[in-house]
Amino acid sequence: MILTWNDGALLDRAIASVSTGDELMTNVIVVDNGSDPPARVPPGVVLVRNDANVGVAAGRNQGIEAGSAPLVCLLDSDAELTPGALSRLVDELVRTDAALVVPVFAGQDPAASAGRAPGLGRKVLRVAGLTATYRSMPRGSAGSWPVEFGIGACQVFRRSWWELVGGIDESFFYGPEDVDFCLRLGAAGGTVRQVPGAPVIHPARRRHRRPLDAAGLAHAQAVARYLHRHRRHLYWRSPVATSITSRLRR
């Protein structure tokens, strides 16, 4: 499922990458979130068109609802699956019985797109441009490793888990709906894993943001809601809480 908004040729490459070098049977669904001019897709691709931008969460839910497959892949319109990547992600999802899996993006550190869910401190550091990564988690020697979340540029998950948690929260217009979705899966008992050896091409985190424009302020409000909703989880695994807990146990 690919969500697009004024993406032009990027969308064409994303669609083409879904079936390249994979033997999986796929049904590609594109949700056009009010593009001007409207997005065009090749024959065989399902197109859901919105007159206006309804937001990332709502648009992705639309696309998921338009399909019926037991496994769902969310792919950003500026991302591309490399040959065999989707098969690798699906194999690991099935092998580990995870709720959701994410890749390591090509040419990037695993912690650039997944790891521990960011708290206020990590968010501030990222907005200030002082870090481009999240706190990593132990990777071990298995074929994949558990993470608390992975960004929504590419996520593969079971439809049954999406249904169980009530879908992606549409009160988030743009970010961090992907982190919230993963944490709600975890709270419901599902596991999220990051998978190496399934590279997906996606641009690294944008370096230049304008936190004081309208979009930046809307994103800040969404982050505040996310931090409030998951405050207990974020606090109790923070370094401060961990230090206090370890002292109390002595």
Image: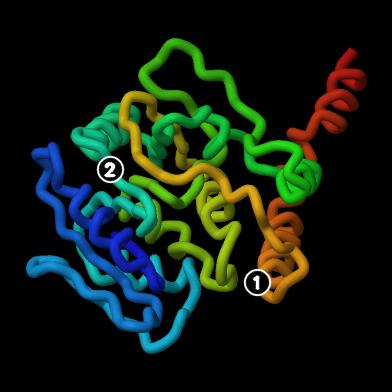
Image quadrant assignment for residue 136 = top right
| Type of amino acid at the residue the image marks with label 2 | Leu
Residue named by callout 1:
215
- Quadrant where the image shows the N terminus: bottom left
Task: Residue at 25%, 71% (x, y): give it.
Answer: 66
Q: Which mark identifies residue 81? A: 2
Whether the residues at callouts 1 and 2 have beta carbons within 8 Å, the answer is: no
Q: Position of residue 18 (x, y in %)?
A: 20, 49
Kindly identify the residue that appears in the image at 66 percent across and 54 percent down: 208
Horizontal placement of 76 versus 243: left or right?
A: left
Residue 111 in view, yes or no: yes
* Count of marks, rendered view: 2
Residue 232 visible in the current orientation: no
Q: Residue furthest bottom?
A: 51
Q: Nearer the viewer, residue 14 or 55?
A: 14
Asked which secondary structure carries label 2, the reply is: strand
| Residue type, label 1 | Ala
Query: Alpha-carbon distance for marks 1 and 2?
Result: 28 Å
The quarter holding residue 112 reads top right
Q: Is residue 196 above or below residue 157?
A: above
Of the two numbered discs 1 and 2 on the same chain, state the one appearing first in sequence.
2
Measured as percent of width and height from the top left, residue 126 is found at 71, 45
Res 200 → quadrant: top left
Badge 1 marks a residue whose secondary structure is: helix
The image shows residue 239 at horizontal and vertical percentages of 81, 29
- In the image, is 31 to the left or to the right of 40? right
